[in-house]
Image: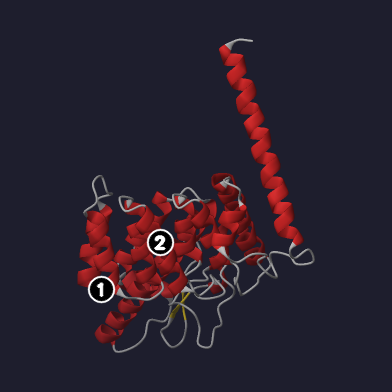
Amino acid sequence: MTARTRTTVIASACLVVSMTASVLLLHRIDQLHPKATIEDVLYISSPKFVKRASLGFDGLMACVYWTRTVQYFGHRHYDGEESYNELAPLLEITTVLDPHMLPAYQFGASFLAPPPPAGAGQPDRAIQLMEYGIAHNPDTWQLYYNLGFVYYTALRDYKKASDVFAQGSRIPHTHPFLKLLAARMAENAGDFTTARMLWSATFESSHESNIRRNALEHLRCLQVDQDVTDLQAAVTRFGQLTGRLPASMEELAAAAHLPAIPTDPDGQAYQLDSQGRVLVQNPDDFPFITRGTPPGYEPPRPKLHSEQ
C-alpha cells in the first residue's frame, strides 16, 4: 500500500467515525425530548452543554446546528409564524461550537434584532451575539459592521452605530464603506441615502440567500419611500404656485417637468388621491414602506420578494 493510499484510507476512516459520532450524538440529544419539534422547543438550550456533548467534533456539530438554524427560521417565516423564540439559542449554540462561523453572526444581525413578524425582536440578544463574535474575531471588520447594523436598524441608536463603524474602520484591510458609514451616522443618520448604503452593504457583503433577499426587499421599499417623499414635495410646490391641488398624477408630472408618470420598483404608476396624497397601487407588495399607504392601512407580514 502506497503512502498516498494509506493516507486516503485513514482520512476516509476518520470521516466515517466523525459522521457516525455526530449521528449518534444528535440521536442522543433528540432522545432527551423525543416528542418535541424544533418549531416548539429547543431540545437543549445550553451552548456549553452541547459543546461538552460534542465529543470534540465541535466544527461538525456547528455545521449541523447552523443548518438547523436556517431551516428553523425559513420554515417559521414561510408558515407565517410571528415568533422565533429558538432563533437566539440556536445561533448561540452554533457560534459557541464555532466562534469563527461568520454567516451565523450576520444572520443574527438581520433576523434576530428586527421586531416580529420580520424577526425575533431581540436586539439585546443580537448585540450579545455580535459582541461575542468580536471578542473571538477582533480583526474581522464584518462583525463591527453587523453590530453597527443592529444599533442602526433595530435601536435607531445612531451614536452607537457611528462609534462601532468607526472602530471597525480602523481594522487593517477593512472595507472603506465603514469609515463612510461612521461619518454619515454622525452627521445625518436618518436619511434615505444612509439607509440605502447600509442595506446595499448588507447585500454585497453576504453570501446567505435569506439575508440578500431581505436586503433587496428593504432596498425596494426604501426606493418607494424616497419616491413618495419627492412626489409629495412636488404636490406641495404645486399648491404653493397654483393655490390648488393637482387634479391627477399626469398634471403633477407635467408641472414638475418629469419625463413620464413616475412608477414604483414593480413598474406600477404612483397614484394621487383627492386629498393630494401620493399612494402606492399595491402596498402589500412593499412590506417595509413607511410612506405611500392610505389612512388606516395595516401592512401584511413581511415577505421576502422571491417568495411572491
* SS type, badge 2: helix
Going 53% across and 88% down the picture, which residue do you hit? 296
Residue 261 visible in rendering = no
Identity of the amino acid at label 2?
Answer: Tyr
Front label number (2 vs 1): 2
Depth check: 98 or 219 in front?
98
Left or right: where does residue 236 sit relative to residue 64? left
Depth check: 231 or 26 in front?
26
Residue under pointer 2: 132
Residue under pointer 1: 159
Going 27% across and 54% down the picture, which residue do you hit? 177
Give residue 229's quadrant in the image: bottom left
Depth check: 52 or 60 in front?
52
Depth check: 206 or 21 in front?
21
Left or right: where does residue 220 sit relative to residue 252? right
Residue 130 visible in rendering = yes
Residue 253 — which label? Answer: none
Query: Residue 274: x percent and y percent?
Result: 46, 86
How packed mark 2 is, by other alpha carbons closer than 10 Å (few <14, some 14-19, many 20 or more), is some
Query: Residue 52: x percent and y percent?
Result: 58, 55
